[in-house]
Amino acid sequence: MRFYAILLSGLLYWVTSLPAQEKSKNGAAGFSPALLKKALESIAQISVEERQKLHDIVIRAFGMTNLAQGRAPAKIEQKIVAWAILDSQPASVMSEDGMLIGEMIPLGDDGLQVLAREMPNFSDIRYRVEAGGKPRMAGSARIEHYDYSADSLPHAHVAKGRLEKFEWKNSGIFPDTVRDVTVYLPANHQTGEETCLMVWQDGSRHAEPHGSMRVPVVFDNLIHQKAMPRTIGIFIDPGRKLRQKPGEKAANRGFEYDSLGDAYVRFLLAEIIPEVEKRYGANFRRTPAARAIAGGSSGGICAFTAAWERPDQFGKVLSWVGSFVDLRGGNAYPSLIRITERKPLRIYLLDGENDLDNPYGNWPLANKQMAAALKYMNYDFRMDWNQCFHGSKGMAPVLPDALRWLWRDVR
């Protein structure tokens, strides 16, 4: 019985150990569907007391109110999906086409029923939960899992850079906006030290060491290996309107990122980069080859636009699931590339076959057209493909390799 007690302790730890702010942000953040699956596989051998503990853990993870109202969405960990419902009738989980995913397992006298299943990777599941043959709840679960390499994991022997933050609300180029800026300074950074520069759009999420991209961890490892030069990273959030609260979706994002022209790169060169130089004693190399800019989705086209407009300032671009579609005219780039004299840019693109297809365009097709135009004009570029959906999950595990390629001749 001790094995099951350990499993339940693990589940309880995941539910209770995260800081309060993480729980409020992510609901039942940290709940482990994988551990739940293991417990359910041997449910017959679990004592009544342990079953009650498992019952209570699930209630805490999914939320009593959500369960009672049939509004508790599925929870996903890697390729494991977990469902829960409160109903007195036997329940099952069905796919959109009517195929049975699994019969739910009762955990208590109050009608709590659960199911945890491993699902195929890169699948977008539409499901419904039925009880007594009647639909009770419906939703979707997107399965997209990649394993990280050692370069995305922290190591005790690798010196760690530090992160500094400030708020910028004095923009003359994007007036009436406020944004957070996070700055990565490499380990043992000294005031006035000459470094390379890499700017990241949608910055806060990418600057999080324990987030999806883990850029600071990758920087630490590659700088330690001398696989990339000592680089300061500037992670910039899109502008929120002054009336907006921190954490709200930035109202100015689409205007700043998807618009063609030089407004955003002027914002970087006239406002943000000088502020970082002043605050942290940064001394960026002046050659464009020592300056890179990165982003995903609309942040990806923003990165390309900045370098396209000012190749004398940014010589390297990292773009994933880039929105080279007709949001604000970005679909023009493949044609512009073909009729414009080649610029001294190195460009990395990544997209996947499960990316968006909507009235604004087809993201995989748009990125293929970009790659074809760059190839036609003999650019120094690389296009990687995988099965990713729209987002950063597909970029995260290959980021170390992409940065090695991007910085391969700069030390």
Image: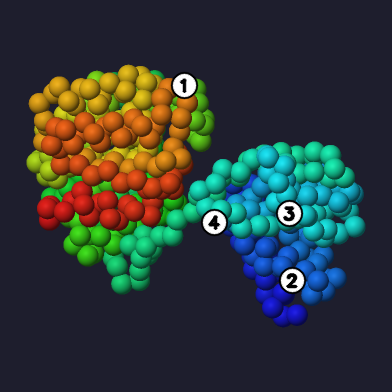
Query: Which residue type carries mark 1?
Result: Pro
- 171, 399: nearer the viewer: 399
Q: Are marks 4 and 1 in contact (CB under 8 Å)?
A: no
> Is 255 placed left or right of 64 in the picture?
left
| Whole-number angstrom distance, CA of label 4 to CA of label 1 | 30 Å
Which residue in the protein does label 2 denote? Answer: 42
Choose the circle earlier in sequence order: 1 or 2.
2
Q: Which mark is residue 113?
A: none
Choose the circle earlier in sequence order: 2 or 4.
2
Which residue in the protein does label 3 denote? Answer: 102
- 183, 254: nearer the viewer: 254
Residue 142: which quarter of the image?
top right
Query: Which residue type carries mark 4?
Result: Gln
Near mark 1 (Cα within 10 A), the count class, few <14, some 14-19 or many ≥20, is: few
Residue at 20%, 56% in the rendered image = 228
Which residue in the protein does label 4 denote? Answer: 78
When the figure is inspected, residue 181 is found, relative to residue 28, above or below; the finding is above
Q: Position of residue 210 (x, y in %)?
A: 44, 55
Q: Are marks 2 and 4 in contact (CB under 8 Å)?
A: no
* Label 4 residue SS: loop
Q: Position of residue 179 (x, y in %)?
A: 39, 32
Please name which of the two marks, 2 or 3, marks the residue nearer to the observer: 3
